[in-house]
Image: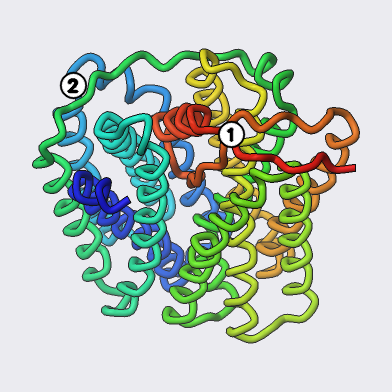
Amino acid sequence: MLTILRTTWPLLLGIMLLMVGNGMQGTLLGIRGSIEGIPTAEMSYVMAAYFAGFLLGSRTVPDLIQRVGHVRVFAALASVISAVLILYATVPHWMFWALLRFTIGYCFSGVYITAESWLNAGSTNENRGQALSLYMIMQMLGIICAQMLLNVADPAGYMLFVIPSVLVSMAFLPILLSQQPAPQFASIQRMTFGRLLRISPLGCVGIFLIGGVFSAIFGMASVWGGVAGLSVREISAFVAAIYIGGLLLQYPLGWLSDRGDRRKMVLVLAAWGAVCAGLTILLQPGIWGLLLAAACVGGVANPIYSLLLAYTNDYLDQKDMAAASAGLLFINGLGSMAGPLITGGLMTLAGPDGFWLFIGLLLFALACYAGWRMTKRAIPAHDQSFVVLSPAATTIAVEAALDSASSDDPPDPGPPSP
């Protein structure tokens, strides 16, 4: 892993700075929206707009890259992101913010596609899995660091919008100055959703549901914190706890999933997350209890996403992985778009508890569906190993992860479950 770090550190450093900037603007908007008195329902549209832009970008930016090249697309999107991050503070109106958030979601999708292409091209079949793991770690560390920076200035001012703009601008330097040549970009293959659903019903339904959970966490956590009366320091700690939980639990849970039925892992994790959400509503804990709940929910949401990808891949042929990854990302995007909207509606009706209610219901539904699917299909042979990925990863990273995992020597799955 140290060898990979030596050769790819410019890319990984750039990715971490990108996530610091993106993580700051996501949480900051929720806090600033509360200060400006923007209703929860309208803030949900602002937060959902990011995922709509991200989804559109994932479908259209690859064609743009093929026409004009990585470097031009990367530089153009970078300029737009840097400008948008400052424009947020100029007009604090939810419709303007939604437009900017849609734009920044589109641009970040393209930036991630470009960065992941470079990282993928700079890796070999032997070390691609480790490179993707480092990529995931840098993503989470970036978001965690972003929450700390929220406490350096007044969120009612301009400075916290300037900082992510500067960091994003700096992020492009190590990426564009990397010695890795711009990779060739092939067309993204497509697979019909009907075929993908037949291959893995749990994978499709689960990816949709966990997309809603992740977008509620990523998009609405700071909005919830403002409605619940938390301070800026408490909101930043709450969001950081979500990603710390995911970072700590990804690898041990992945190791366990390679040695048993992944569906059981999905069922147990989803059920545990639903219980944590329910207990938070019932007990109404203080800040330390909320941080623990955030770590638990984040600790199951991120691993479940990777587990569902690995489970789907158990049923895929090598030639179908690229097309399947594109389909899964689109399904995840649809769930992500719906997450903030439904969460905002529930919070408008039920107050802050609507945030936990939405997360708990989705995880409970996923646990029930995973349990039902276990009665319909035998345990698949593990033809690949677990690879850590974030729901924010693009098709490039997902396809590379599936391909890398399938090329590894399959682990011993252990005795079959009764």
In the image, 294 versus 389, the foreground residue is 389
Numbered badge on residue 393: none
Taking the image as shown, residue 254 lies to the left or right of residue 92, namely right
**Image point (55%, 15%), residue name:** 320
- As drawn, the label of residue 410 is 1
Eye-nearest disc, 2 or 1: 1
Identified by mark 2, the residue type is Gly
Position of residue 129 measured from the top left corner of the image (x, y, whole percent):
42, 40
Residue 290 on image: x %, y %: 62, 77
Three-letter code for the amino acid on which mark 1 is drawn: Pro
Is residue 408 at all visible to an observer of this figure? yes
Judging by the rendered image, the residue that carries numbered circle 2 is 69
Between 179 and 416, the one nearer to me in the picture: 416
Q: Residue at x 20, y 58 (%)?
A: 167
Q: Tell me if I can see residue 56 in this picture.
A: no
Place of residue 179 in the rendered image (x, y in percent of width and height, measured from the top left): 10, 37
Measure the C-alpha gap from mark 2 to mark 1.
37 Å
Name the spot of residue 181 as percent of width and height, x first.
14, 29
Q: Secondary structure at mark 2?
A: loop
**Location of the C terminus (image quadrant):** top right
Look at 33% across and 22% down and name the residue there. Answer: 62
